[in-house]
Image: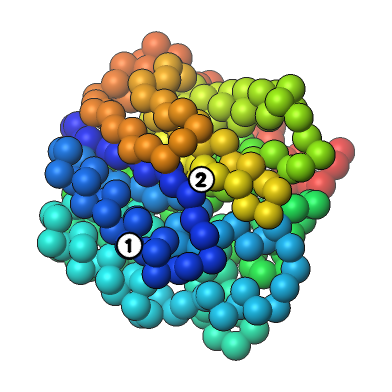
Amino acid sequence: MKKTEIALIQYSCSDNLNENLDKAHHFVAKAAGEGANVVALQELFNTTYFCREIDQRYFEWAEPLDGKIVTNFAVLAKKLGIVILLPFFERKSAGLYFNTMAVLEKDGSIAGIYRKMHIPDDPGFYEKYYFTPGDTGFKVFKTSAGNIGTLICWDQWFPEAARLTAMKGADILVYPTAIGTLPEENEADKSQFCDAWTTIQRSHAIANGCFVASINRTGTEGGTTFWGNSFICGPFGEIIARAGEGEEIIRASVDFEQIEKQRQTWPFFRDRRIDSYDGILKRWI
């Protein structure tokens, strides 16, 4: 697969899970109708970002991998003939829950899953209460739409995650996300956070010579404002598609042959001093 057409979908969610599913279903079908052959949804695509607070009732929203959510969208993937990247709240067993992304092939099969490795615990982002740290390791899926590296939100701040996923052969790193500003934060804070969020992911594209796609949600939930700005960038860090702050589908045609050109221009993988990185395995030196 030398080229692929990727679409990212950002939208707002409510406590009505059925409405959220219907909205996602509509947007995925629309993106496919516009020519996308891989469609990526936002983190926890069918719920609010419930990690804003600690409340045991939200565990009721989790579903197993063979539940109706994944099954429904696997059928949709087959019907539309596209790859769907589906991030959801997974119930593995009683007391064991993950922040998971299912990769659904165009024939409706499950290519595999990735479970979020880095789990934050900050005011308004109490994920450690809900999610077990991922046990899949960093993953790349060889799909009909290309070699897709799957990472989720907080993973995007760690260059080690991007590097290891790229080293496994990812053509594109995909980061479903839920990032926004809290009630006590202002417009200047939002601008600073959005710039940092964009910059770190563009740097992953450059350092690893691959494409990056990041999908954020929109809307206000319990005082937290999610500011969208989903984007796709190329291996030189150039932004080739970007959303605003509202509900939107963005789409781009990505040419994976650009990866070879970038890595010939900047041979970072050739020049890595793999004999000198022992310290990276320590918490601090």
Question: Looking at the image, is mark 1 or mark 2 earlier in the sequence?
Answer: 1
Residue 20 at x, y percent in the picture: 41, 61
Q: Amino acid at mark 1?
A: Asp
Quadrant of the rendered structure where residue 71 is?
bottom left
Q: Going 28% across and 29% down the picture, which residue do you hit?
A: 252
Q: Going 55% across and 85% down the picture, which residue do you hit?
A: 93
Q: Going 81% across and 47% down the picture, which residue do you hit?
A: 283
Residue 127 at x, y percent in the picture: 69, 61
Q: Report the disc number at residue 22.
A: 1
Residue 254 at x, y percent in the picture: 27, 28
Mark 1 surroundings within 10 Å by alpha-carbon count, few (fewer than 14), some (14 through 19), many (20 or more): few
Of 81 and 249, nearer the camera is 249
Side of 170 relative to 138 (left or right):
left
Query: In what element is the residue under mark 1?
Result: helix
Side of 147 relative to 50 (left or right):
left
Side of 63 relative to 3 (left or right):
right
Of 255 and 249, nearer the camera is 249
Side of 282 relative to 130 (left or right):
right
The reply to whether residue 30 is visible in this rendering is yes
Of 197 and 116, nearer the camera is 197
Using the image, determine if residue 230 lies above or below residue 183: above
Q: Going 52% across and 60% down the picture, which residue do you hit?
A: 14
The reply to whether residue 87 is visible in this rendering is no
Distance from the alpha carbon under mark 1 to that under mark 2: 16 Å
Q: Which quarter shows the C terminus?
A: top right
Q: How many marks are shown on the rendered structure?
A: 2
Q: Amino acid at mark 2?
A: Arg
Residue 214 at x, y percent in the picture: 47, 38
Query: In what element is the residue under mark 2?
Result: loop
Q: For the view shown, which residue lies furthest in the top direction?
A: 265
Q: For the view shown, which residue lies furthest in the right direction?
A: 285
Residue picked out by circle 2: 217
